[in-house]
Amino acid sequence: MSIYASGQEDVLLEEDIDVSIGEPADLIVFNDDHNTFDWVMQSFVEVLGHTAEQSEQLALLIHLKGKATVKSAAFNELRPKKDALCDRGLSAVIEGKG
C-alpha cells in the first residue's frame, strides 16, 4: 500500500482503495490555467448534479486554494464522475478517507 504524507495527514492513493467494498473517498479537483469558471461550473452541474450556487462556490474555492473536494461518496460511485470530469479537461483525483 502506498501512502504519502500530505501536510499533516496520510492519504490513500486511488490505486490503493478497495473498490469492491465501496470505501469512502473524496473526489478532488485541481486548479489549472486553461478551464474557464463557466466550464468548470457547468461540468459540476452536469456531472456531479450540484446546483449552480454550489458549483460557483467550488470553482472559486479551487481557484483560491488550488484544489477542493467536490464530492464525497463511495469510491465506486466517484470513479465514473472523476473520469467524466477528466474527459472534460479538468484535473481530478480520488483520495481514500481511510
Image (cartoon, helix red, strand yellow):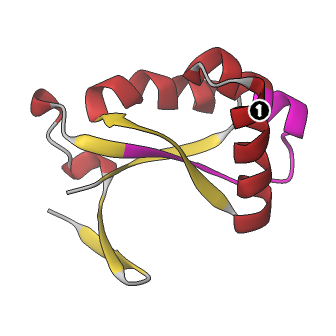
Q: Which residue is mark 1?
A: 53
What residue is drawn where x is 26% and y is 47%? 15
Q: x, y percentage for residue 5? A: 34, 79
Outermost residue to the bottom: 8
What residue is drawn where x is 72% and y is 56%? 61
Quadrant containing the C terminus is: bottom left
What residue is drawn where x is 59% and y is 18%? 49
Name the residue nearer the viewer: 97 or 32.
97
Vertically, is 94 above or below 51? below
Q: Quadrant of residue 50?
A: top right
Q: Quadrant of residue 87?
A: top right
Q: x, y percentage for residue 63? A: 79, 57
Give the tally of numbered discs.
1
Name the residue nearer the viewer: 96 or 51.
51
- Residue 36: tell me if it is visible: no
Quadrant containing the N terminus is: bottom left
- Residue 72: tell me if it is visible: yes
Q: x, y percentage for residue 23? A: 19, 40
Left/right placement of residue 22 relative to residue 58 reads: left
What residue is drawn where x is 78% and y is 64%? 64
Vertically, is 29 above or below 78? below
Label 1 neighbour load within 10 Å: few <14, some 14-19, many 20+: few
Q: Quadrant of residue 22?
A: top left
Residue type at the position of mark 1: Glu
Q: Write down the region rendered in magenta.
A: 26-41
Left/right placement of residue 68 relative to residue 42 reads: left
Q: Is 62 within the magenta?
A: no
Left/right placement of residue 46 relative to residue 14 reads: right
Name the residue nearer the viewer: 10 or 89.
10
